[in-house]
Amino acid sequence: MENIIFEARGLVKRYGQVTALDGTDFSLRAGEILAVIGDNGAGKSSLIKALSGATIPDSGDIFLDGKPVKFRSPIDARHHGIETVYQDLAVAPAMTIAENLFLGREILRPGLLAKLFRVIDHKKMLEEATQHMQGLKIGIRSMSQAVETLSGGQRQGVAVARSAAFAQHVVIMDEPTAALGVKEGNMVLDLIRRVRENGLPVIIISHNMPHVFEIADRIHIQRLGKRAAVVDPKKLSMSDTVAIMTGAMRTEDIPTEMLA
Amino acid sequence: MSNPTARSETKNWLEKLPSVSVLGPLMALLLSIAFFATQHPNFFTLTNSALITSQVMVVAVLAIGQTLIILTAGIDLSCGMVMALSTMVMTKMAVDFGLPAPLTLLLGLLVSTGFGFLNGLLITVLKLPPFIVTLGTLNIAFAIMQIYTQAQTITVSDENSILLFFKQDISFAGITIGYGAGIALTLFLFTLGSWALSNTAPGRHLYAVGNNPEAARLTGIPTQRVLLLVYTLAGFIYGIAGWLSISRYGIGNPNAGSTENLDTITAVVLGGTSLFGGRGLLIGTIIGALISGVFRSGLTLMGARAEVQILITGILVIVAVAVDQLSKGKNSR
């Protein structure tokens, strides 16, 4: 087996009469970008919510580095080193870039009194924010400008940078390019590659097939609440992938060398 | 096309300003001072400036609590009444029941803090809207106060009582500023509050909760605890405002409270703080309170009727809210 660092087995999630997850499996290898695709209602958001702690599955197991884990909340998952970039809830627009990067994890000044009153070290936060954003090659001049002065792509860049800065194990990105134009979308794709180059595996949920094929090392196809297949985007064509996703091609008919 | 270098320099310069949100209010304050100074010779004098400040200080301190709450995208309609109730606890227990004033002061602060805590609990635990919760506690505080005092005004006759601490004048260089101690307390509280809001983690969390509660929650900020803390702290501040009010007027007044409620919201809004939460500065609130005070004083000196002052304040508030609404549309794109 390859080095699997994040895994789920037999996840089930029901909402009343609706079965969103019907015993789905999931696995993420070290240092890869794994795309999760699926039709509406295939259970891909439910899967991601379970993996990021946003919902608690009814049954099934999740393993991080081989050890079983149970996430009760997104905060809980974060304590385990899993950071999630949410599609549009990510930032506080009126606050500065540096503040957004460190929101909830502010760098405090040294000293007993400063710790007691939780006095923020603005200077150090600015420096570290600048350094970190440069490391990801995000070209924003001033870290003390409000996030709302940025373009959509730059805002997404701030959200991605925040996750990459604090994630110990995994970064999950929900539709990171959905609201963006072509140029900005490509900018975010480059950014995701750099996160991988820095050694973090990335799970990306996307409807954008060209983006998925451009960036993913493997593609997890979710269908009817189960994992239909995991395919190699370098071997299987986009149309065949969509065919599996919609059920036009059966899982058994996929040539084994196309699976990943 | 403009020169890009020049443009980015202008932008840098703009970013370095404390916040554009208080520039408008500050201009409005300076312009109104300039206007009234030309209308009456006694307006722009040290005595009148000190008088205006001492007239607005109670509302200004109350409005500190209101600002904190509005920054979280909440509102407090009970603040004036909670303050009034605390002044009645402080004065009646000291004057009628003969308890030591320091003790009754603490009891008054406890009552106002308790009301703030109650507001916070109802809003965070029962998830009720702040508008309705504080409308309810406004009436509860009013009723308790009327029953407790039987609508009797209490005069603090002991000149040395700690309840009158902030009525002391401050003199320096031959100039005496009436209620200097109270003015000093007001400035101190605004300075401390402004510092804490911009330089401590809880201060920044308060902005985050008002600006985007969901993002704040997802970054691990205990948003409900922040809210509970804010309403409780606001209650404590209302108690301090009550102490200041007793010092200023020498009485516990059971008819107080109703005008102060709206006066605080007026001060906050005139100070450029957004009613949508997450935007604004505490320093704007004292500017807002001073704008009201300047108009009241200036119009009085010009011999205008009291109703005209109310009319103009009303127009100012609507203008300020309209500016807030328009800039919100621009920012959210």
Image: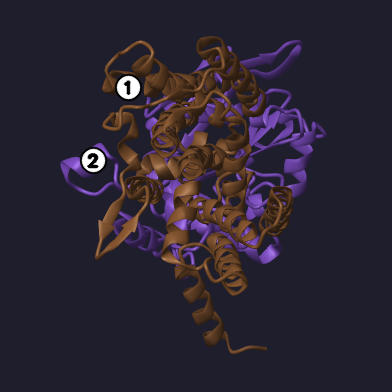
Quarter of the image with the N terminus of chain B in it: bottom right
In this rendering, the answer to whether B182 lies above or below B155 is below
Q: Nearer the viewer, mark 2 or mark 1?
A: 1
Give the labeled residue for mark 1: B106
Pointer 2 and pointer 1: residues touching (CB < 8 Å)?
A: no
Is B213 displayed left or right of B332 in the figure?
left
Q: Chain of mark 1?
A: B
Q: Could you tell me the amino acid type at mark 2?
A: Lys
Q: Position of residue A38 (x, y in %)?
A: 71, 35
**How has the structure been colored for display?**
by chain
Is B11 displayed left or right of A36 in the figure?
left
Give the farthest residue toward the right.
A248
Q: Residues within 10 Å of mark 1 (few under 14, many from 20)?
A: some
Q: Foreground residue, B318 or B277?
A: B318
Q: How many marks?
A: 2
Q: Foreground residue, B62 or B230?
A: B62
Give the labeled residue for mark 2: A115
Q: Could you tell me the amino acid type at mark 1?
A: Leu
Is A84 displayed left or right of B75 in the figure?
left
Residue B51 appears in view: yes
Q: Residues within 10 Å of mark 2 (few under 14, many from 20)?
A: few
Is B62 displayed left or right of B174 in the figure?
right
Q: Chain in brown? A: B
What tint does the image give chain A? purple
Residue at horizontal 67 percent and vertical 23 percent from the top: B132
Q: Quadrant of residue B323?
A: bottom right
Q: Position of residue B265 (x, y in %)?
A: 60, 42
Query: Element under label 1?
Result: helix
Quarter of the image with the C terminus of chain B in it: bottom right
